[in-house]
Amino acid sequence: MTGYAAVLLAGGAARRMGGVDKPARPVGGRPMLHRVLVAVADADERVVVGPSGPVPAGVRVTREDPPGGGPVAATAAGLALLRSGAPTVALLAADLPLLTAEAVAVLRRALDGSADGLACYVDGDGRRQQLCGVWRLPALRAALDRLAAQRGGTVDGAPVRGLLAGTTVREVAWSGAGAPPWFDCDTDEDVRRAEEWTT
């Protein structure tokens, strides 16, 4: 497989957790953000968009414009920092504490031989986990441009599903051992469940 980049989206208000810095919440003794960074440790470059606290050497941090503009605006900010020329990019929420390097590799393999599009996990109910996916970089840039054109030149506040219109999506079911890699932590109960899976 060729190289890839990783953009981690660490913004969001975390309203259901009382406004805490959600990616900094520990699961299994390590902040969720750092667990996701480990899952993409082999990426050519890693960018975190949003408040992050300390990050490992080599990880770059930026903010969406405007701050709080949502995940699509954060995606655009993350792509603006990429410079490796990697043909694919893992676009990931920063609150996926159960994500593994193998789960990312499965998505990357799903794009092998294709020129464009997105590979993302689907859960047991068939819902696409759009922030646990790997894109062909030209397809993601084109999707951002298309969405901005539809919205008068801005992606501020745009929904992530808006990126998928006209995009070839390869849906991937997780068949590996262990917890689902797309499991995100939006509530204290989610964190408790993730802790159980990591023990």
Image (spheres, rainbow, N blue to C red):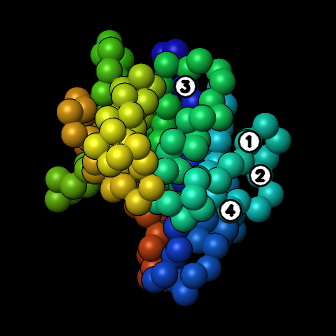
**Mark closest to the chain's N terminus, 3 or 2:** 3
Q: Which mark is residue 51?
A: 4
Image quadrant containing the C terminus = bottom right
Horizontally, is 9 left or right of 145 in the view? right
Q: What residue do we see at 55% from left, 25% from top?
A: 4
Is residue 121 visible in this depiction of the protein? no
Q: Nearer the viewer, mark 1 or mark 4?
A: 4
Horizontally, is 174 left or right of 71 in the view? left
Q: What residue do we see at 41% from left, 60% from top?
A: 157
Q: Which mark is residue 55?
A: 2
* Residue 146 in picture, x, y percent from top left: 32, 35
Q: What residue do we see at 74% from left, 41% from top?
A: 59
* Residue 87 in picture, x, y percent from top left: 49, 19
Q: Which mark is residue 4?
A: 3
Report how far apart the C-alphas of labels 4 and 2 lie in the structure.
11 Å
Instruction: Pick the residue in front: 154 or 36.
Output: 154
Q: Which mark is residue 24?
A: none
Instruction: Pick the residue in front: 146 or 5.
Output: 146
Q: Residues within 10 Å of mark 4 (few under 14, many from 20)?
A: some
Is residue 73 visible in this depiction of the protein? yes
* Residue 63 in picture, x, y percent from top left: 64, 53
Q: Secondary structure at mark 3?
A: strand
Q: Amino acid type of disc 2? A: Val
Instruction: Pick the residue in front: 197 or 181.
Output: 181
Q: Secondary structure at mark 2?
A: loop
**Mark closest to the chain's N terminus, 1 or 4:** 4
